[in-house]
Amino acid sequence: MNIIRTAVFAVLFTSAAMWAQTSQINGIVKDSSGLAIPGAEIKATQTATGLVRNTTSGTDGGYVLTNLPVGPYLLEATKQGFNKYAQTGIVLQVDSAPTIDISMQVGSVSEQVTVEAAALQVETRNTSIGQVVDNQRIMELPLNGRDVHQLIFLAGMASYPGQAGLQTVRNYPTVVVTVAGGAPDSVGYSLDGVIHQDPYNNLSLPLPFPDAVQEFKVEWSAVQPQYGYHSTATVNAVTKSGTNQFHGDLFEFLRNGDLNARDASLSSGTR
């Protein structure tokens, strides 16, 4: 019986962790008068990879597309007796669940109404407060040692408390971060939906180089249940999943004391 309980808990925990690295789209399909449209075929296509998710609106017109990897999407809706609906420019970020309502017009399916996602996508399912550090900042901001952890401090409630009271026996640098005034070892870290923490000091394990990280999100204040193993905050990072185009990176990493700035404590005549 204990083995069964352990197996069930492991499956549920893994499912929650995997959901944490993905996103979802939900909303209601309505006609021009505001009445719900049941049975509409909804399709979301990730334009970078061609990944497709499909669903059908319910009797109340509601729909949910779950387990969507981050990235740009095209949202389409079709229903006999209505013009085809297409919305472009939707960009899903890590652990987001925007509400996108669809308004369909009476007409022929062969005709299409295209909408650009210029309006704000409303988040109604997540109760936490958080901030996403996107790929542009990860790739373009200067990083000491190419350590992505330093970008966590871009989140408004993250700060560096110092190393006091924290011990490590690892041969890699341990980054100490406190969020919203909480203890550093009360911040949860995950990478691609899997716990990414050092069991010795409960701090983060090294993250991949910025070339491999897509984005991450720092959340605090009433975080979602899947992050319940830490009380203060969570840092949820996802790696790049690729596109339909071949590409690569080349960089040179040089650390040499001869290139360092002169120590201000030394006189101008000494080195």
Image (cartoon, rainbow, N blue to C red):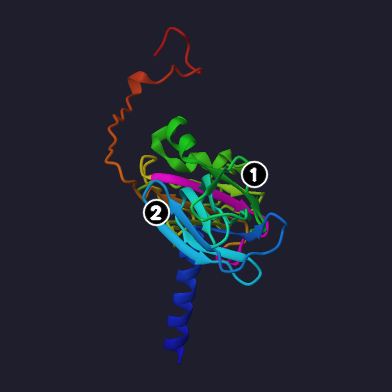
Identified by mark 1, the residue type is: Leu
Q: Check the image and report above or below for 141 versus 124.
A: above
**Pair 2/1: label in front:** 1
In percent of width and height, residue 7 lies at 43, 81
Quarter of the image for the C terminus: give it.
top left
In percent of width and height, residue 70 lies at 46, 51
Between 95 and 69, the one nearer to me in the picture: 69
| Residue 177 in view, yes or no | yes
Q: CA distance from mark 2 to mark 1?
A: 46 Å
Q: Check the image and report above or below for 186 versus 138.
A: below
Q: Earlier in the sequence, mark 2 or mark 1?
A: 1
Mark count: 2
Q: Which residue occupies the extreme right position in the image?
A: 33
Mark sitting on residue 169: 2
Q: Which residues are magenta?
A: 213-228
| Residue 21 in view, yes or no | no
Q: Which residue occupies the extreme bottom position in the image?
A: 1
In percent of width and height, residue 249 lies at 29, 35
Q: Is residue 239 left or right of residue 94?
A: left
The residue at the point 60 percent across, 42 percent down is 155
Mark sitting on residue 120: 1
Q: For mark 2, does the 10 Å Cα neighbourhood hold few (<14), some (14 to 19), or many (20 or more) residues?
A: few
Between 133 and 116, the one nearer to me in the picture: 116
Quarter of the image for the N terminus: give it.
bottom left
**Mark 1, secondary structure of its residue:** loop
Q: Check the image and report above or below for 68 versus 49.
A: below
**Mark 2, secondary structure of its residue:** loop
Identified by mark 2, the residue type is: Val
- Residue 271 included in the magenta stretch of the image: no
The residue at the point 56 percent across, 69 percent down is 39
